[in-house]
């Protein structure tokens, strides 16, 4: 019985590790749900990165010196590439609502 429990536990750990490694890393802690098509658009766009001071995390207030680029299919979101990190921004508040790794 102990042997079966050890095998089942080991198999569960291996399966969960495989699932976790196949995922894209997205850091999001706000309640703002960003549609998949917006994320895909931001991932595909090629624009220069802007260097700014500070750690780029969810909630970061994007400085006015950084140009926010619109999402053509959804005016509720903008994006920028800051310190080589792609971020989705709420244009009204200029706060980062999603960081795409």
Image (tube, grey):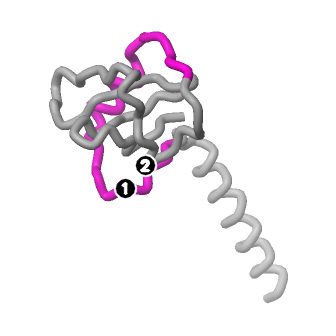
**Is residue 32 highlighted in magenta?**
yes
Residue 29 x/y as whole percent: 43, 56
Q: Which residue is mark 1?
A: 30
**Is residue 36 highlighted in magenta?**
yes
- Residue at 50%, 18% (x, y): give it: 50
Determine which quarter of the picture holds residue 41: top left
Provide the secondary structure element on which disc 2 rests: loop
- Look at the numbered discs 1 and 2 and tell me whether their residues touch, using CB distance below 8 Å: yes
Q: Which residue is mark 2?
A: 59
Provide the secondary structure element on which disc 1 rests: loop
Q: Which residues are magenta?
A: 26-51
Determine which quarter of the picture holds residue 37: top left
Q: Please, which residue is most extreme toward the front here?
A: 64
Q: Please, which residue is most extreme toward the right here?
A: 3
Q: Please, which residue is most extreme toward the bottom here?
A: 1
In the image, taking residue 1 as reference, residue 93 lies left or right, namely left
Determine which quarter of the picture holds residue 16: bottom right
For the residue pair 28 and 92, the one nearer the viewer reads as 92
For the residue pair 63 and 3, the one nearer the viewer reads as 63
Q: Is residue 2 above or below residue 77?
A: below
């Amino acid at each position: 019985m102990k042997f079966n429990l050890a095998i089942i536990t080991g198999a569960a750990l291996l399966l969960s590790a495989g699932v976790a490694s196949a995922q894209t890393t997205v850091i999001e802690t706000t309640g703002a749900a960003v549609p998949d098509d917006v994320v895909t658009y931001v991932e595909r766009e090629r624009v220069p990165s802007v260097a700014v001071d500070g750690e780029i995390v969810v909630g970061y207030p994007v400085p006015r010196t950084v140009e926010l680029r619109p999402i053509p299919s959804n005016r509720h979101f903008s994006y920028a590439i800051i310190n080589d990190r792609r971020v989705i921004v709420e244009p009204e508040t200029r706060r980062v609502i999603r960081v795409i790794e």
